[in-house]
Image (cartoon, rainbow, N blue to C red):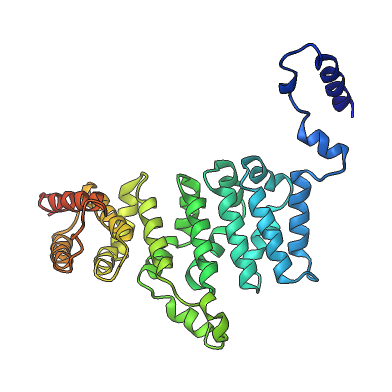
Amino acid sequence: MEKLLKWSIENSQNAGSDPDSQRQKAPNPEVLAQLFGQPDDAQLMRAAMDTILDPSVDIETKETAFDNLEMLVENLDNANNLESLDLWAPLIEQLVNPSPVVRKMACWVIGTAVQNNPKSQAALLMYPKAVPNLLRIASTDPSKEARLKAMYSLSSAIRNHASGYDSFKNAEGWQVLMSIIRQETQHKSDEQTKNVPDSQRHLYESDEDIRRRSIFLLAGILSTEPFEDKIEILRSLSAVPSLLELLHVEGSYSAIEKIVQILLVIAKSQAGFTREEKEGIRRGLLRAKKDGLLDLDETQNEGLTAEWRLLEQELNSAKRE
């Protein structure tokens, strides 16, 4: 009230004499909110979580509460306040909620809160079950939409964050990604959805977007050092043959480009390729060319063509032979 009174007096005194009076600074919005009884962001965040946790509230209302919370944590300060407001723990608990809608929305809020936000990334990692649960949803959840949001959360949580990568690695994240890329987990979700009504089946069916998100995440992980340890893990999982096979079934140029980028990282490393891997890649490149994967015009993907040529050059080097 005191701040608002001061602002009112200053502006009434200057209104007649100051030519810039129309541009006087407005009062602090938080002060106005308190004065007129409007909730601030912290109160709105708590209210949203109260609605989410209320067992008497229907799913549609919970989804609206999640939407509100997600919009609030787009603000960096609000995202960082999740910890001080004790909201991280109940949010992470929703990853095991029986409702696929709630699991999906929880993944979405988590992904938004930690995206490009080292402080919130660190806060998330204080909860040991967070990354393993996200990996579980991404790989085996019967809801396609939940799996997509889980991939979004994982990517946001570990991008450019060493501790996030360590949590991913310790939770067997590499194995999970490769199983998704190979689609080894699809039969599990198929079994879980055999009794789903046809009207809801689109929410559960497998989607190539899941595999593509996995490829993008794999490329993102390999874009930061240390490279050698990551490359050895990929080799131990026989990733190169699986990635080559995808060149012939993947219909997205952006996904193909990511696969080529992954192969380039391996090629440029000190480890390089074994003789057998080089021969396999050469056969894969030849087969891909015959399939028309490089029939690109200037408006499609010049970068892919350039990276493909770089990969061919690396294959002709004597590294690791």
Tell me: residue 129, above or below residue 38: below
Q: In this rendering, does residue 128 appear at all?
A: no
The image shows residue 172 at horizontal and vertical percentages of 45, 62
Q: Closer to the camera, 215 or 28? A: 28
> Which of the image's four quarters has the C terminus?
bottom left
Tell whether 155 sits left or right of 253: right
Tell whether 195 sits left or right of 250: right
Query: How many circles with numbers are drawn on the protein?
Result: 0
Residue sitting at x 74%, y 57% = 49
> Which of the image's four quarters has the N terminus?
top right
The image shows residue 65 at horizontal and vertical percentages of 71, 59
Tell whether 247 sits left or right of 24: left
Residue sitting at x 27%, y 54% = 300
Q: Closer to the camera, 25 or 182? A: 25
The image shows residue 201 at horizontal and vertical percentages of 53, 81
Residue sitting at x 56%, y 88% = 195
Name the outermost residue toward the top. 17
Q: Closer to the camera, 104 or 243? A: 104
Q: In this rendering, does residue 242 appear at all?
A: yes
The image shows residue 247 at horizontal and vertical percentages of 25, 66
Which quadrant would residue 294 be assigned to in this image? bottom left
Which quadrant would residue 287 be assigned to in this image? bottom left
Residue sitting at x 24%, y 47% = 269
Tell me: residue 82, above or below residue 17: below
Q: Closer to the camera, 241 or 238? A: 241
Tell me: residue 54, above or below residue 77: below
Name the outermost residue toward the bottom. 195
